[in-house]
Image (cartoon, rainbow, N blue to C red):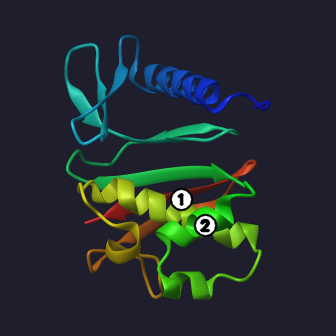
Amino acid sequence: MPAVARGERHRTEEKIVARLVEEAFGEGAVKVNDTNGRPWVRLADGCRRPVTVSHCAACAVIALPAHDSDSIGIDVETARPQLARVLTRILSDAELAMLPPADMEAMLRAWTLKEALYKAAATPGTDYRRDISILPPCPTVAGTPCTILHSAPFGQAWLSLVKVP
């Protein structure tokens, strides 16, 4: 996507997500958010399905849980110079210490895992640094082990998909 104003880029990304939702769920399906900001798809017949959504300058993605009661989160991100600065606000000191210096792939993986876990937790007040951990042996939210379903390069971006019990 060419360099455009952030607001315009966000609107374009949201239009792409709306198109993905309609392609995946059929005509009349729309993405809506509940009062906590968690996305859902409202189908043409009025039924609702939980989804997780992410978009960045390079792409947009949606994912559905296997069961409506499953809690999953997805995040996709492209390399950006400010990523290292932003990570200091969401990674704990121990997580920052495990990152190789100036390793953009490691930073993208850390960022997308944290974001995906935050979305899957779906709990208002969840603190990135205190409540979400990506330290080995497995990620946790509020001390509960979580599952990484996917975390790998995705075109020009990095994509992580997780499940929280």
Q: Nearer the viewer, residue 32 or 41?
A: 32
* x then y, percent, for residue 80: 73, 54
- Above or below residue 37? Residue 98 is below
Residue depicted at x 65% and y 38%: 59
Secondary structure state at the residue bearing disc 2:
helix
From the image, state whether disc 2 or disc 1 is nearer to you.
2
Amino acid type at circle 1 is Ser
Query: Label 1 belongs to which residue?
Result: 160
Q: Is residue 56 above or below residue 4?
A: below
Mark 2 or mark 1, which has the lower sequence index?
A: 2
| Residue 164: % across, % down | 31, 64
Q: Are marks 2 and 1 in contact (CB under 8 Å)?
A: yes
Q: Which image quadrant for residue 68?
A: top left
Q: Secondary structure at mark 1?
A: strand
The answer to whether residue 136 is left or right of residue 107 is: left
Q: Residue at x 64, y 65 (%)?
A: 85
Q: Which mark is residue 109?
A: 2
Q: Is residue 76 left or right of residue 120?
A: right
**For this view, does 9 lie left or right of residue 134?**
right
The quadrant of the image that shows the C terminus is bottom left
